Image: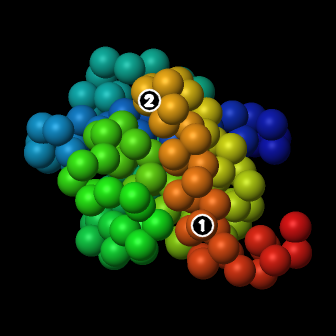
Amino acid sequence: MSNVSLAKGRSNARKKAMQALYQWSMSGNDLSEIEVQFHDEQNMEKVDQDYFHELLHKVPEQVDELDQLMEPHLDRKLTELDPIEQAILRLSTYEMRNRLDVPYKVVLNESIELAKMFGSETSHKYVNGVLDKLAKQLRTIETHNK
């Protein structure tokens, strides 16, 4: 897989995973059922399947730790966040913490795009602000050298 198609596949995986995580947080349905539903009902052809699976299962597995990392950077309680913003921030926090192979600027840019696509009019600004602070905490060397 070329870098362009790998990047696009991961971008598509983030998009689908964010939607699946939103569905999980709203419905409480089993993650495996949600994954099967996405494969049955969504066009998953250009999605990095392994990355989608990882994000869909690892984010909920680590949700308490991810929320604890995020909370100091929020201006309100986590439960008061828009569910789309919450799904984007959890996914992005997971990547910042666990996927050091993904540059923090990629995580930031992808998250902003997801917020613009699915969130409210100002979601992207909020997501950017939270993740920028989080990057300084979790990606000290990367952010220090920019």
Of residues 53 and 112, the one nearer the viewer is: 112
Q: Of helix, strand and loop, which one carries label 2?
A: loop
Q: Residue beneath label 2, please?
A: 119
Please give the name of the residue rendered at 12% of the width and 38% of the height, measured from the top-left corner: 27
Sequence-wise, the earlier of marks 2 and 1 is: 2
Query: In the picture provided, is 96 more to the left or to the right than 78?
Result: right
What residue sits 73% from the left and 61% below the top?
A: 103
Q: In the rendered view of the protein, which quadrant contains the N terminus?
A: top right
Quarter holding residue 144: bottom right
Is residue 6 rendered to the left or right of residue 98? right
Q: Residue 99, position in %: x, y?
A: 59, 67
| Vertical placement of residue 99 versus 129, above or below | below
CB of mark 2 within 8 Å of CB of mark 1? no
Amino acid carrying mark 2 in the image: Gly
Q: Position of residue 104 (x, y in %)?
A: 69, 61
Work out whether residue 2 or residue 97 is closer to the camera in this orientation and state it.
97
Residue 140 position in % (x across, y down) = 71, 80
Residue 17, picture quadrant: top left
Question: Mark 2 packing: few (<14 Cα in 10 Å), some, or many (20+)?
Answer: some
